Amino acid sequence: MSDAMTPSRPLSAPGQAQKVDEARKAVVGCQQLSKVFKDFWMRDRARAVDKLDLVIYENEIFGLLGPNGSGKSTIIKMILGLLKPTHGRVVVFGKPPTDVAMKRRIGYLPEESYLYPFLNARETLDYYGKLFGLDSKVRQKRIDELLEMVGLEHAQFRPVREYSKGMQRRIGIAQALINDPDLLILDEPTTGLDPIGTKQVKDLIIELGRRGKTIILSSHLLSDVEDVVDRMVILYGGKIRDEGTCESLLSSSERTLIETDELDEQTIAEIDELIRRRTGGEKSIRTVSAPRQKLEELFLRIVEDAQTEKASTSGAMHGGLTAAFLMANADREHGEALIDSLINDADDHATVKSETETVATDAEPTQSESQAGEESSLIDSLTGDGDGDGEVPAQVQDSSGDQKNIETPQEDVDQGVIGSLLDDDSEADENKGSQR
């Protein structure tokens, strides 16, 4: 990990407020943050987060570690504005989490992939791209790059409901990156992924960190966090138990590790004798063993050999390179796309304008025709569709102040109802006459 990304400020004690680093801009700040879940009777049921003080700086890969129920997901939801804190404050990009405009700068991968099962991969990414207001050309280009990056090009037209959990996780990572966010929040990103996908996600996080993005990584898989984060906090019971860089937290001062080429037993014995003599017999070689490769390395080598042999598989393929719009030249490409869209809009506007002028020149109405059209529209607005059989004259004042007779329809009058009333009245009169 680059030294430039390592915080140069002194670390605070666990649970104490952190001092603001003047040299770096804070992206997320939590002050005395607490969240208490209550039961039906408004009694405290669970204290998920307890007086948390936390500052996350820009260009930092920050790890939230802790066992299940330690408050990681609750903290993330309060940062996103999905949960309201019981006490304390949260600030994201200098604004409250409820600010809608600020959310355009955030990408979020939840712990569970909530996707529309009837949409395929392309439709899913296109839907989220539209939510961020991305231009059609930009959306299609980013979709192609993201599908290649997560290894789902061959399954891009299959419904998401047919995806395995690992494949759904891959498309979830793609949707979290569709808007090229400044702050990327990943909640258990490697859940359900095979070792290939896990390594790919870790490489992606490192690459995005090099580009300058701020990343919050929440996980209880310690090996995943250890390989990528610059700084981390370890939570338990909603409180910070320890925090710092990987180097400061994991370095051991009780042992010294020496790695050499293969040695014979006599050389090892002489080295052990030297150590005993120099330390007065207090220290010696504890163990001697041959190094072995990690299981992850063996697994990846076997898969790579199978892919070299072009063995078929129905699962996700090995992903490609990081999407181009996520790289350092993304701003230039976005500018070119913006220029193209402006040129296209200008051409379309000019075409529409010329067509409108042509139509107006070829079919320009005379003054008498326009006046007749205005009178006709006025009459139509007053008489409805103008096709009524019975019409009653009415007085309407035109624009010149003169009174004009126009015809108003009587179609809205139900003649059947009136006739029945008249029939009833005539029958009643006849009955009265007969009684007399």
Image: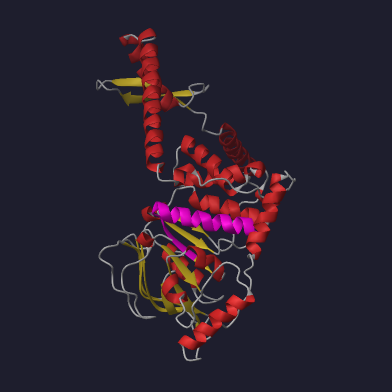
363, above or below 26, in the image: above
* Residue nearest the viewer, comparing 410 with 340: 340
Front residue of 162 and 13: 13
Number of numbered callouts drawn: 0
Where does the N terminus fall, quadrant-wise?
bottom left
The answer to which of 339 and 228 lies nearer the viewer is 228
What residue sits 37% from the left and 27% below the top?
A: 343
Q: Nearer the viewer, residue 43 or 335?
A: 335
Q: Quadrant of residue 320?
A: top right
Q: Quadrant of the C terminus?
A: top right
**Quarter where residue 91 is shown:** bottom left
Q: Is residue 243 left or right of residue 172?
A: left
Residue 56 image position (x, y, % from top left): 37, 66
In the image, residue 82 lies at what x, y percent? 46, 64
Q: Residue 39: x, y in percent?
A: 53, 80
Where residue 176 sits in the image (x, y, percent)?
Answer: 50, 53
Identify the image's colour scheme: rainbow, by chain, secondary structure or one colour.
Answer: secondary structure
Q: Main secondary structure of the magenta part?
A: helix
Q: Residue furthest right?
A: 312
Answer with left or right where residue 248 lies relative to residue 276.
left
The part of the image, by quadrant, that contains residue 35 is bottom left
Residues shaded magenta: 194-217
- In the displayed structure, would residue 383 be above or below residue 300? above
State whether residue 319 is above or below residue 423: below
The magenta stretch spans residue 158: no
Q: Is 166 situated left or right of 73 in this image?
A: right
Q: Residue at x 70, y 50 (%)?
A: 305
Residue at 54% across, 54% down: 173
Q: Is residue 129 above or below residue 69?
A: above
Q: Can the viewer see residue 407?
A: no
